[in-house]
């Protein structure tokens, strides 16, 4: 008998909270369950944070359950206040639709939508044409304001002032769950742990309106050991779109994560057997770098394919082994005239996004953390030109031990 997917998700570290743990496990063991995860279309690419929920969807689908990827074409117009200290900036309908379409194309890379094995829908299909008074009578009557105000998802916003605009978000997400229950017999909602209050709202709405059971399950959020959201760098988010985050940069992000997070990420973000995950996670000192390489390769392979993962690993080895170069390292090109004149090191660091500002670039140099062609840069006013290019016709800038960038001449 195949292993219950609830146990697989629990063993790999996905599950944070569940409305009815025993019932959910029993249901997943004996029936083919239709479940959904919602994705608000706030950008034109999914991120590393979304990737964790996609992996949970893949485990569920592999066990024979049917995922619904719900695009938030309607809810994105409001914005989820969960865990946010400021109101989300409002986006145009055109931008939201574009982002939703980008999400849909990316989902197709990870989830099998053939022969009814999965569903993709958009809550704009039912939220945008709602009659407000009818909605209040049909749905609003089931929600207690006292209970809503006590929910975790509103706590941070209460300090700065929660708008009535955002206050509606929980009701809209709950309405989504009820709508999917009616349309597709969807009985389980999954989502990040910051969605717990919203998910409970939907479970309760279905019970009150239909007199039937529905279930909720939340997933671990990717965070650093300090509790900050993982998947962000000085440049911004780690995107699944290779044009926004190159496969090399994507690989390097996971190659350089904290030692204490390696085992957790191997369990959540790869399909390696858990015996191997635990073996790799137990490696100590320098050997933990072997586990990080496996982690980076496996995640990059799932997101960008085996060929790109191999190229990224080769580029990483070339740099760490002997200061060599690879075409897969991020690069910036300048025209010949600019390179002949010379460019100061502060400008190079800012242009390549190795430093966010000139003052931060200055601080990096003064702390001895900047190297050009493996030579430490000591002067903050140092100028580099084409005359400094090596035999390969490039400048290799290194920040610290792990961040590299090539400077080349435009062809």
Image (spheres, rainbow, N blue to C red):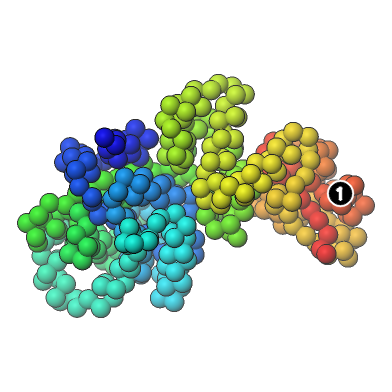
Which residue was labeled with disc 1?
392
**Residue 217 x %, y %:** 26, 45
Instruction: Between residue 274 and residue 373, name the one nearer to us.
Output: 274
Counting the numbered discs, the total is 1
Instruction: Between residue 5 and residue 219, name the one nearer to us.
Output: 5
In the depicted structure, whether residue 82 falls above or below residue 220: below
Q: Residue at x 87, y 52 (%)?
A: 393
Q: Residue at x 14, y 54 (%)?
A: 204
Q: Quadrant of residue 7?
A: top left
User: Which residue is the extreme one toward the right?
Assistant: 387
The answer to whether residue 150 shows anywhere in this view is: no
Q: Residue at x 39, y 56 (%)?
A: 112
Q: Quadrant of residue 124?
A: bottom left
Q: Is residue 161 left or right of residue 323?
A: left
The answer to whether residue 322 shows anywhere in this view is: yes
Which quadrant would the C terminus be assigned to in this image? bottom right
Instruction: Between residue 213 and residue 2, name the one nearer to us.
Output: 2
Instruction: Between residue 169 and residue 314, name the one nearer to us.
Output: 314
Q: Determine the secondary structure under disc 1.
A: loop
**Residue 313 x %, y %:** 65, 41
**Residue 263 x %, y %:** 47, 31
Q: Is residue 255 left or right of residue 407?
A: left
**Residue 199 x %, y %:** 24, 52
In the depicted structure, whether residue 194 falls above or below residue 128: above
Q: Residue at x 74, y 57 (%)?
A: 332
Which quadrant would the N terminus be assigned to in this image? top left
Q: How many residues crowd around disc 1 within 10 Å: few (fewer than 14), some, or many (20 or more)? A: few
């Amino acid at each position: 008998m195949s292993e219950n997917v609830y146990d697989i998700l629990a063993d790999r570290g996905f599950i944070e909270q569940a409305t009815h743990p025993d019932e959910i496990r029993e249901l997943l063991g004996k029936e083919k369950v239709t479940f959904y995860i919602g994705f608000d279309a706030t950008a034109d690419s999914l991120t590393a944070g979304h990737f964790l929920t996609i992996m949970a969807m893949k485990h569920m689908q592999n066990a024979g359950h049917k995922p619904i990827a719900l695009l938030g074409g309607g809810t994105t117009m409001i914005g989820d206040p969960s865990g946010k200290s400021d109101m989300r900036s409002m986006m145009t309908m055109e931008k939201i639709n574009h982002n939703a379409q980008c999400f849909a194309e990316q989902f197709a890379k990870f989830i099998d939508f053939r022969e009814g094995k999965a569903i993709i829908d958009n809550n704009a299909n039912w939220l945008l044409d709602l009659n407000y008074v009818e909605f209040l009578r049909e749905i609003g009557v089931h929600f207690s304001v006292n209970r809503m105000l006590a929910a975790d998802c509103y706590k941070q916003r209460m300090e700065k002032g929660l708008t009535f605009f955002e206050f509606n978000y929980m009701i809209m997400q709950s309405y989504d769950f009820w709508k999917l229950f009616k349309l597709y017999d969807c009985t389980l909602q999954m989502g990040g742990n910051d969605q717990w209050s919203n998910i409970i709202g939907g479970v309760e709405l279905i019970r009150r309106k239909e007199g039937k059971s529905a279930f909720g399950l939340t997933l671990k959020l990717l965070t650093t050991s300090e509790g900050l959201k993982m998947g962000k760098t000085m440049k911004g988010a780690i995107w699944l779109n290779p044009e926004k985050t190159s496969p090399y940069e994507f690989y390097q992000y996971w190659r350089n994560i904290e030692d204490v997070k390696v085992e957790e990420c191997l369990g959540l973000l790869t399909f390696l057997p858990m015996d191997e995950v635990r073996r790799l996670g137990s490696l100590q000192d320098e050997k933990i770098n072997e586990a990080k390489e496996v982690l980076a390769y496996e995640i990059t392979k799932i997101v960008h394919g085996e060929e790109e993962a191999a190229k990224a690993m080769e580029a990483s080895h070339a740099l760490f082994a002997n200061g060599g170069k690879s075409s897969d390292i991020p690069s910036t090109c300048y025209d010949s005239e600019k390179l002949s004149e010379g460019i100061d090191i502060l400008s190079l660091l800012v242009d390549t996004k190795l430093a966010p500002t000139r003052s931060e670039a200055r601080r990096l140099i003064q702390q001895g953390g900047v190297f050009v062609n493996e030579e430490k840069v000591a002067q903050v006013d140092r100028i580099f030109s084409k005359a400094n290019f090596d035999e390969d016709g490039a400048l290799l800038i290194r920040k610290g031990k792990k961040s590299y960038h090539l400077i080349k001449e435009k062809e």
